[in-house]
Amino acid sequence: MAMEIRNFAVMGHTSSGKTTLIDALLHKLGANDRMGSVDAGTSTADYTDEEKARKITVSAKPFTADYQAGGKTTRMVMIDTPGYQDFYGQVICAAHATETAVIVVDASSGVQVGTRRAWRCAENRGLARAVVVTGLDKENTDFEKTLEGIQTALGKACLPVGLPLPDGSVADVLGQAAPEAAAGRVEEARSSLVDLAAETDDALIEKFLGGETLSADELAGGLRRAVLHGSLTPVFVCQPLTGAGLEALLEGAARLFPAPGESAIKDADGNTVAAGEADPLCARVWRSVNDPYVGQLSFVRVFGGTLKSDSEVLNAGRGQKERVGGLLRVNGKQQDSVDQAVPGEIVALAKLKATGLGDTLCGVGQSIMLPAMRFPSPVTFQAVTAKTQADEDKIGTALARVCEEDPTLEVERNTETRQMVLKGLGDVHIDVAVSHMKRRSNVDVLLETPKVAYRETVTAQGEGHYKHKKQSGGRGQYGEVYLRVDPKAPEDEDWFVDAVVGGVIPGNFMPAVQKGLVEGMRSGAVAGYPVTNVKITVYDGSYHDVDSSEIAFKIAAARALKEGLSNAKPVLLEPIMTVRVTIPDAHMGDVNGDLNQRRGRIMGMQPEAGMQVITAEVPMAELFRYAAELRSMTGGQGSFEMEPARYEVVPQMVAQKVVAETQREKQED
């Protein structure tokens, strides 16, 4: 009989006790010989230098250990995930590698914004869900009040399967008999679960209504179906530091969490992926990391079939074969070689040549593609420059490496501002990426606020004329261009109109005129930014039989355009972003006022998942530091996302400052 596997990701708000719970479970299961501590820097889960220094989880990490009870062994594959908002991309990655999300709630804080964010992520992925309440040993905590808050925020399907006892222990509602003092509450909780289990199956409900008692297996089977379909979210109670409730959580995971294959996995075409060990191989790379000892490690979750060492697989998306050497089961710093991985297991593969994060691996000759992983767009931008020439030579490779590991990091070479911009989900996210570059690639960089990619356009008609005439011995240069600049109407298909009649500019020189205009539009008349949405009509000019040339007409056109733009009431344009700000009700006034100060326009407000969502349009120049400032304003409870909307005219007062700053930079250069 094949070993049972339970695969779950531990999620929740930052500092809710997720990593401590993972450390406690690993210690109880014998995966480490002592209980790790985040505060002491001895955590098995948060073992990187970055995590030790910041005392937060930075990346999602898998752990595997076997749970033995009642003569049965269940392999527990658990993923520790960050709670800090900047690393939400890691939570999404973990959600693509598991069947169940275990949401940790600290009783002293209750349901927080990170709790809701983790819940939405699990809900969007269709994962089974469970809740673990920790922190009941802290002052002024109450389980019933915490449970009420969970049910209000996350739904009435959240029912307790564990209850805290006065002596600090935890009663397993489905397990042993409770002390007499708590027997009534335990029986009440058990009765609710029995009712729910019976409703999942017609045979069980007949038996239940007939007054018969459901067996332990029938009860567990019914509740497991309820968890799988979302009609039950079991609520456990754990005290990781004392070990109370850990056994009940492990037993509950074995009894109630879906096994691999019980929750249907769909491929990109909507077909169900066969999840048996003998079925065709289907696996996904859900995390990629550069290991200092073995190089690039690709963490793979097997969904169907069996992945074996020393085998050949196909990268379905890229159509390339990959040679799989050894398989590694990674538990923190410990790496053990294994021969194979079956559905539900997570292993690491070293040095795959063409495979990256999110790619699907299948058997050679097969064609199975899992749906693409979707991530939030960056909200924090920093311009990156190398400290030294030696750093300059390596900065491109270093940036590419950190972006390969983290799908929510992006690098853009902005041709308009001539800056390299690193984009992420927050200041800490960017700082960690810079630290990784320093430690792994020995590259030092400087960060600064990026320049805004302003543009220019015109608001009226303007005439331009230039005669390029140069005589310096021998053949001279001659070309004359008259043109008209207008705002380009939306219905106009062409930006350039050749209205020359009588051959005053020969047809063979018109391509040169166009080239001159294209080059001239790279630098406008206000502050030298690219020009957009203009219509240029060339209607007159003159030429010389001998001295006219393409270069002469190119120069004449560019300088005539400069004059035409100056005469057409030019204005500066700035990028406007559509922003969705998610905050608690209590911060509505502060956030609305702050958005107004940022020249934002409030477009609407609506409640969503217990929070308020403000939609606004805000100039991008006002948003570079907004992620950090919003969190400061809301005590860490606010978040936002943004996407480009359009370009708009910059107000005169702001435009004057932009022009002055641009002129100052040009003088410095």
Image: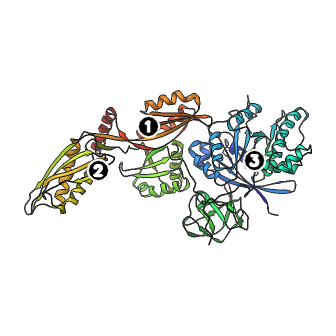
Residue 561: x and y in percent read: 21, 48
Locate the N terminus and report the quarter of the image it occupies: bottom right
**In the shown orientation, is residue 421 left or right of residue 510?**
right
**In the shown orientation, is residue 117 left or right of residue 515?**
right
Residue 24: x and y in percent read: 75, 46
Q: Check if mark 1's residue and mark 2's residue have beta carbons within 8 Å.
A: no
Q: Check if mark 2's residue and mark 3's residue have beta carbons within 8 Å.
A: no
Disc 3 packing (10 Å; few <14; some 14–19; many ≥20): many
Q: Which residue is mark 2?
A: 522
Foreground mark, 2 or 3, reads 3
Q: Check if mark 3's residue and mark 1's residue have beta carbons within 8 Å.
A: no
CA separation in Å, label 2 and label 3: 60 Å
The quadrant where residue 133 appears: top right
Residue 297: x and y in percent read: 60, 60
Q: Which residue is mark 3?
A: 227
Residue at the (34%, 41%) spot, across then down: 573
Residue at the (57%, 32%) spot, across then down: 635
CA separation in Å, label 3 and label 1: 43 Å
Mark 1 and mark 2 lie on one chain; the one further toward the N terminus is 2
Foreground mark, 3 or 1, reads 3
User: What element does badge 1 sit on?
Assistant: strand
Is residue 391 shown above or below 363?
Answer: above
Residue 251: x and y in percent read: 81, 49
Outermost residue toward the left? 473
Q: Is residue 487 visible?
A: yes
User: What element does badge 2 sit on?
Assistant: loop
**In the shown orientation, is residue 115 left or right of residue 156?**
left
Q: Which residue is mark 1?
A: 618
User: What element does badge 3 sit on?
Assistant: helix
Mark 3 and mark 1 lie on one chain; the one further toward the N terminus is 3
Colour treatment of the image: rainbow
